[in-house]
């Protein structure tokens, strides 16, 4: 990641229960990498994914490809 601080956005699927994923879309659009973090650990690790891989993952989640059963 660059030295600039990303602007973090919570997932629209996150509820008030505290299980939230955040990502930085503006950073992704300028670098091609999508930073992702756990909102409960804002100073914890950040996972950076290539934008196309992140888009494929999100599409899979929306399509129900990852069963929780």
Image (cartoon, grey):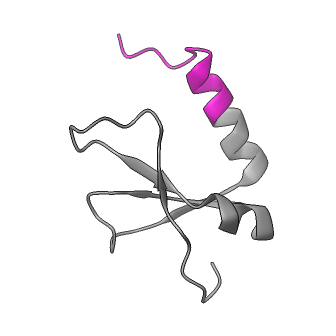
- How many numbered marks are there? 0
Between 7 and 63, the one lying in front of the other is: 7
Q: Is residue 55 left or right of residue 3?
A: right
Between 2 and 6, the one lying in front of the other is: 6
Q: Is residue 31 left or right of residue 41?
A: right
Q: Is residue 62 left or right of residue 41?
A: right
For residue 62: magenta? yes
Q: In the rendering, at what x and y percent does residue 33 appear? A: 71, 62
Q: Quadrant of residue 61?
A: top right
Q: Name above or below for residue 56 compared with residue 8.
A: above
Residue 32 appears in view = no
Residue 19 appears in view = yes
Q: In the rendering, at what x and y percent does residue 48 appear? A: 60, 62
Which residue is pictured at 37% across the width and 16% down the height? 68
Residue farthest to the top, as pictured: 69
Which residue is pictured at 24% across the width and 39% down the height? 16
Question: Which portion, as a residue range, is magenta?
Answer: 58-69
Which residue is pictured at 43% across the width and 32% down the height? 13
Split into 4 quadrants, where in the image is the N terminus?
bottom right
Q: Quadrant of residue 57?
A: top right
Q: In the rendering, at what x and y percent does residue 4 appear? A: 60, 86
For residue 59: magenta? yes
Which residue is pictured at 45% across the width and 54% down the height? 22
Split into 4 quadrants, where in the image is the C terminus?
top left
Residue farthest to the left, as pictured: 17
Q: In the rendering, at what x and y percent does residue 15 appear? A: 31, 35
């Amino acid at each position: 990641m660059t030295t600039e601080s990303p602007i973090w956005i919570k997932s629209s699927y996150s509820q008030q229960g505290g299980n939230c994923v955040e990502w930085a879309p503006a950073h992704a659009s300028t670098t091609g990498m999508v930073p992702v973090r756990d909102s409960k650990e804002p100073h914890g690790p950040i996972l950076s994914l290539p934008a196309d891989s992140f888009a494929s993952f999100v599409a899979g989640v929306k399509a129900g490809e990852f069963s929780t059963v």
